[in-house]
Image (cartoon, rainbow, N blue to C red):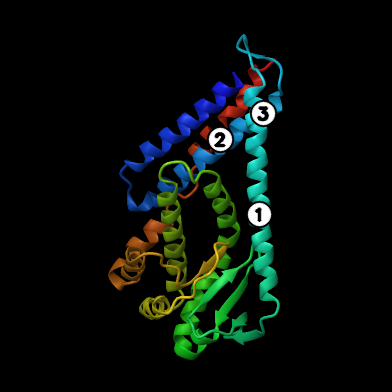
Amino acid sequence: MHLMLILGAIALAVLSRLIAKHRPVAPAHRWTAALGPFLFAPLLLLCTVVAVFCMGREGHMLGLSVGSLGWVLAVDSLTLAGGMLLRLGWQVGRSHESLKPLPVVEISHTTARLLDTPALFAAQVGFWQPELVVSRGLLDTLSAEQVAAVLAHEQAHTHYRDTFWFFWLGWLRGLTVWLPHTEALWQELLRLRELRADCWAAQRVDPLLLAESLVQVVRSPLTVADFPCAAFGEAASPCRLTERIEALLPDAEGELASSVEGDRLPWLWLFAACLPLCTLLVHH
């Protein structure tokens, strides 16, 4: 019975991704449309294996013997998930330690770590309280006004705690990389994260200045490791860069705000993902 629960959860997770891929999405609901399916599948699987683990090797459900094969599979799954979480945490800790030798500079009343490279780079690196890292190339190439626009974007990442939340989202991504459309949903979340930071910054600096800065930074990118890092020039594809630039144009400001500030908490998805825990009530 335990094995049937796990296989059923896998089938439902795959089905949810296939259905979500073909749903039309209004601009105001992009966060929910991406975050809901992205969270549902891994949380459903995690809740299922946790429920199976808590039931143990012995017992009955709905008159059927539970068996031990499903329980062993649940233990292996939880061990793998825990190992991936520890590895990701170690990467974050290592990245934080690598910042300590970098000199501290004061830029527009903002403290930052200075990276001695000609590439243009600005990012928040860390976990709950990330540190701002900027490159010497950024300070030497951009004007003072453009640097201020870049810093406003990075302050938005701090405001929204993006490094913290995307640490956990990145962990869930790693757990379900084998599910359909995981990478597409992940890229959409990254796109929305940057659009949201652009929107926040555009309310404090000139949007066109922000767009000009973005183009210059993307022309001279600095490749970084895959750890929680919210970088200003993170535009993995020309489509993402084009969307960010177009969203900063004066005629698109209202559309930008509606696409990144919609109903972003998919409560129904989260509630449905936790339903496997209710099977504990019918286990004896």
Q: Give how far across and how far down residue 176 sits, in percent.
A: 51, 43
Secondary structure beneath dot 2 equals helix
Residue at 42% x, 60% y is 191
Marks 3 and 2, the one that precedes in the sequence: 2
Residue 111 visible within the image: no
Estimate how packed mark 3 is, as few (under 14), some (14 to 19) or many (20 or more) residues with alpha carbons within 10 Å.
Answer: some
The residue beneath circle 1 is 87
Q: Position of residue 162 (x, y in %)?
A: 55, 61
How far is the residue under mark 1 from the one under mark 2? 20 Å
Sooner in the amino-acid sequence: mark 3 or mark 1 = 3
Residue at coordinates 57% horizontally, 70% vertically from top-left?
Answer: 124
* Residue displayed at 42% across by 67% down: 199
Circle 3 sits on which residue? 72
Q: Is residue 257 above or below residue 72?
A: below
Name the amino acid, label 3: Val
Which corner quadrant of the image does residue 49 belong to? Answer: top right
Alpha carbon of mark 3 to alpha carbon of mark 1: how far?
A: 23 Å
Q: Which residue is mark 2?
A: 45
Residues under labels 3 and 2: Cα distance?
Answer: 15 Å
Residue 85, compared with residue 200, is above or below; it is above
Report helix, strand or loop for mark 1: helix
On screen, residue 14 versus residue 136, left or right, reads left
Of marks 3 and 2, the one in the foreground: 3
Q: The N terminus is located in which quarter?
A: top right
Q: Position of residue 140 (x, y in %)?
A: 49, 90
